[in-house]
Amino acid sequence: MMGQTPEQMIEGQRQDWNRVAGGWEKWDRFFDEQMAFLNHRLVADARLRAGMRVLDLGSGTGYPALLGAQTVGSSGSVIGLDLAEQMLAVARRKATALGLANVTFRTGDVTAFPFEANSFDAVTSRFCLMFLPEIPRAAAEIARVLRPGSWVAAAVWSAPEKNPSIGLSMEAIKKVVELPPPDPTAPGIFRLANPGDLAGMLQQAGLVDVTDQEFLAEWSYASADEYYTSLLEIAAPIQNLMAKLSADQIQEVRRLITQAATPYQRGDKITFPIAVRMIAARKTL
């Protein structure tokens, strides 16, 4: 990633997310069951209600845009924006199945919105902003398109040590093959993990009443093998690294990952703690 322009980074991410779209659709019910509370929290923090026009950033397979569309009702509307057309194709199928005619999904760059100023009553975003090469630019765009008095609500991952289900795989791969140290300023899962990171950028963009809370929860897998399989099918960075390994190295990584997951056994499931930063802010009147 070093030496890449923001445009090159975005194009690489587009290709990655399109490639894993099938995996996300396969695991959709699992994530809907395990993580639905985040969608409800975002809808609440953005103060969604009937009749609102909402922009959802990084919608992927429809989170939380679909819940947002149900919340604002037929008198409101939601536009979901994402880089990956294949991910949005999944979201559209889900919207059709739910009978939602008030949500539209569009491909686009989350750092440059094709919308007029003061054109949305709320902005939501779940696990998107930390992947952007130019986060302050996205914060400025959010402030621009929000109507005065309206709210943005975003979820980003908190510290890696509080999210072992994300870090286990990388630690296992590092035991098998040498990896360069991560650049803490580069786009990535934990780019906005520190308290105040995203909140400060939203304040710099002119937003007020900013809140930044670490939200603790957990999610469960049926087994360590299910956890390993899900990683391979939805985690583009893991796929990229595993593609460079030999068959023997892959087997060793699998052994290490399932072994590391075993201590999280609780009853008949593997249950991991998770920590998410929930940030909300309002545009001044």
Image (spheres, helix red, strand yellow):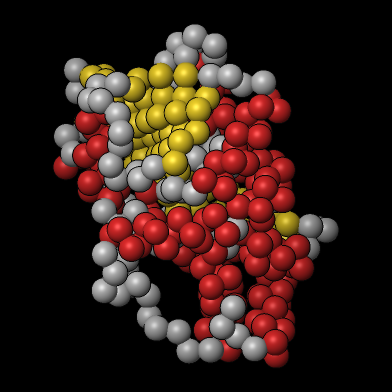
Where's the N terminus, which quadrant?
bottom left
Can you see residue 209?
no
Up-down: is 185 above or below 71?
below
**With 103 as the anchor, is 182 left or right in this view?**
left
Quadrant hosting residue 57: top left
Q: Nearer the viewer, residue 228 or 232?
A: 232
Taking the spot 62% from the left edge, 41% from the top edge, the residue there is 90
> Which x, y percent locates residue 130?
37, 54
Locate residue 43, reporting x and y percent: 48, 28
- Residue 177 visible in image: yes
Number of numbered tags placed on the structure image? 0
| Picture residue at 35% right of the left edge, 44% below the top | 110
Q: Is residue 253 left or right of residue 148?
A: right
- Where in the figure is residue 19, as x and y percent of width and height? 57, 59
Q: Is residue 124 left or right of residue 233?
A: left
Q: Tell me: residue 132, above or below residue 75.
A: below
Residue displayed at 44% across by 41% down: 107
Vertical comparison of 278 with 10: above or below: above
Quadrant hosting residue 261: bottom right
Residue at (38% x, 80% y) in the render: 181
Depth order, front residue of 264/259: 259
Q: Nearer the viewer, residue 284 or 66?
A: 66
